[in-house]
Image: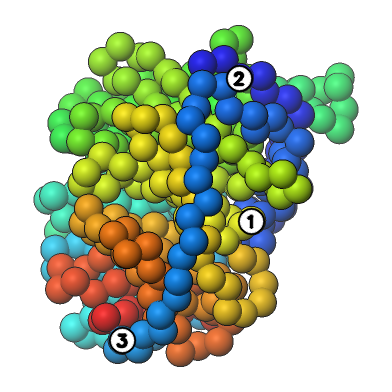
Amino acid sequence: MAHTYSKKMVSIYKRLPAWSVALLVGILLLTSSCRDTSTTPTDNHASQQAQTTLNQAHGSFNEYPLPQDKSGVMRPAVDSRGRVWFGEMGQNYLASFDPQSKTFEQLKTPHGKAGIMGVIVAPDNTIWYAEQYANYIGHYNPANKHFDTYALPTITTPDPNNSKQLLNLPVAPNELLLDRQGNIWFTEMNADAIGKLDIKTGKFIHYPLSNPRTVQKLSPYGIALDKRRNIWFTNSGTNTIGQLDPASGVLRFYTPPTPAGQDPPSLMEIVSDPSGMLWISTFNTNKLIQFNPHTESFTAYAAPITGRGIPGIYGLLATSPNDIWATVSASNAIAHFDIKTKTFKYYPIPSPNCTPLGISQGPNKSFWFTESATNQIGVLNP
């Protein structure tokens, strides 16, 4: 499916402080700069706009303030012991929180440049993370406190402010995942590519998303693995989703239709549920989008907005074929979406205007999330 990509994205490394692009307002500025991109579907089935309802719920919350201000907390991940891991882009830390001792551990990463974005926990309880500004994939073993780093190449592109100069940029790894063979896959926001790290050899493979290759136009953001081992990702620069077949390298792209008079959705996170459906969060709208890869059709579910601010949904989890969990910024809530009943249930976060970002499920079925505006991490027991 061919798409024409237009409008060069201005480098986030020249426009914004390093950690601010990780926060909701920073991401909105980044994605909104590309709203003139074509969003007309090619061969896709028509999108549906589904009516949804809202129920208020009151689970048990606990919130834990970070030891210092301006932490810039990002996506959390929970290990089998219940420890919560996350990056602090404001302080240049890889951090963890132990719910048993109620203590934080903050680690300075090798060669770090305050750019930790995606964090995941491997089955052996070691930690993988993407250092966007230092341009590497990192690995940390809590058992022996050892770090390994896997350096990524840089890319060059004309300076949008001076055509006679070139910018030397990191590929900007953003979100990552672990496949069934133990390899690390990640999005390269600046390089318009998907990367793969073979952890046995330490070698990278890069999959450009356009031909001829572009830089800073597609800006791939979220990444997911489906049950057929396909890699799925969002392109925040063009508001499309893509599918990569790792075996053949074949790429396909799909564009959610945009209702007349509305802005295209700024696509962020993507997850695959156990039934094979894809779910996508939108940052500038209140839409939770479902994509059916069998029918190539989209369905948008409107999340009710109960407050002011950025309406978007950011963090996503698919915990069963019927249950989607998300963070909703304007409503200051953790949302549960029941796929069968098409009903949103909101759990209002106690701290007002906390701007919830990432979300992850703990071993006891609790939900941990980061609060970027109040410099806290929180946990919900529904």
The residue at which mark 2 appears reads as: 3
User: Looking at numbered disc 2 in the image, what kind of residue is underneath it?
Assistant: His
- From this view, report whether residue 130 is shown above or below residue 240: below
Which element carries disc 2, helix, strand or loop?
Answer: loop
Q: Residue at x 15, y 68 (%)?
A: 363
Pick the residue in front: 359 or 102.
359
Per the image, label 3 sits on a secondary structure element best described as loop
Q: Quadrant of residue 215?
A: top right
Instruction: Check whether the beta carbons of the residues at disc 2 and disc 3 lie within 8 A of each other.
Output: no
Q: Position of residue 269 (x, y in %)?
A: 45, 49
Q: Residue at x 13, y 50 (%)?
A: 123
Residue picked out by circle 3: 59
User: Which numbered marker is on residue 196?
Assistant: none
Horizontal side of 217 relative to 355 (left or right) equals right
Q: Residue at x 44, y 21 (%)?
A: 252
Q: According to the image, label 1 marks what residue?
A: 284
The part of the image, by quadrant, that contains residue 157 is top right
Q: Residues within 10 Å of mark 2 (few under 14, many from 20)?
A: some
CA distance separating discs 2 and 3: 45 Å
Q: Are marks 3 and 1 in contact (CB under 8 Å)?
A: no
User: Separation of disc 2 and disc 1 at Cα?
Assistant: 22 Å
Image vertical order of residue 149 relative to residue 160, above or below = below
Q: Nearer the viewer, residue 223 or 170?
A: 223
The reply, left or right, for residue 338 in relation to residue 237 is left
Residue 297 in the image: x percent, y percent? 44, 35
Where residue 295 sits in the image (x, y, percent)? 36, 30
The local secondary structure at tag 1 comes to loop
Q: Nearer the viewer, residue 230 or 186?
A: 230
- Do we see residue 140 in this rendering? no
